[in-house]
Amino acid sequence: MTTLPVPGDGPVPRSEDREDPVRVAAMDRLSDNVVLGATVLRVRDVSRSAEWYRDLLGVDVTVTPAVEHPTAVFRFGQTLYSLWQLTDEEDPPRGSVSDPYIVAVVPENLDAIRAGLEAGGARVTRIGQGNGFRFFRVRDPDGNLIEISSPDGD
């Protein structure tokens, strides 16, 4: 089992260490102060990817050109995402089913959203259903996976 470091108090307690009050207190302090800052998506070309997210997903994207690592940021709801340009030596995402991915939950119009993405040239999956949601998936130009889902009844 992998453990994460806790500054000044060793690793986060594993389940068998939960009876140790010092370790439990350290874990509680860390979890109370953690906020998800952003999710980083690695891309080959920030400008091209920013255009894709803006044009196909309708998000406002802010591009920050830089010599070493151009970046762009956008929000889905309250979550901040950063597009980070790969260096020439880095490989893009492999597009594996085990890769992390974005899940965007929309309240309605899942079929229309899917149709709009497909009309815009995106390769989308068929609509699936499970766990009380209908969903489909789409990959950005660099293979980052996005699942768009809606509660059943849409």
Image: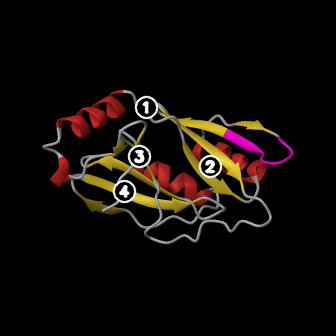
Looking at the rendered structure, the secondary structure element under dot 2 is helix
Mark 4 and mark 3 in contact? Answer it, CB < 8 Å: no
Q: Residue at x 16, y 54 (%)?
A: 16
Question: In this figure, which residue is indicated by the disc labeled 1?
Answer: 35
Q: CA distance from mark 3 to mark 2?
A: 39 Å
| Rendered location of residue 97, percent (x, y) | 44, 70
Q: Please, which residue is most extreme toward the left here? A: 19
Residue 122 quadrant: bottom right
Residues 93 and 152: in front is 93
Q: CA distance from mark 1 to mark 2?
A: 29 Å
Mark 4 to mark 3: distance in Å?
Answer: 36 Å
Task: Classify the position of the N terminus by image quarter.
Answer: bottom left
Q: Amino acid at mark 2?
A: Leu
Q: Nearer the viewer, mark 3 or mark 1?
A: 3
Does residue 17 appear to the left or right of 124 in the view shown?
left
Q: Position of residue 52 (x, y in %)?
A: 68, 51
Amino acid type shown at disc 1: Val
Question: x and y percent of residue 134 in the render?
Answer: 31, 55
Identity of the amino acid at label 4? Phe
Q: Earlier in the sequence, mark 1 or mark 2?
A: 1
Q: Secondary structure at mark 4?
A: strand
Give the residues drawn in magenta, as a range. 66-72
Is label 1 or label 2 in front? 1
**Amino acid type of the residue that numbered disc 3 sits on in the rendered structure:** Pro
Q: Label 4, label 1: how many angstroms apart (C-alpha)?
A: 27 Å
How many residues crowd mark 2 within 10 Å: few (<14), some (14–19), many (20+)? some
Q: Which residue is mark 2?
A: 56
Mark 4, residue position: 135
Q: CA distance from mark 3 to mark 1?
A: 17 Å
User: 63 or 125, which lies in front?
Assistant: 63
Against 98, is 40 above or below?
above
Where is mark 3, residue-wise?
5
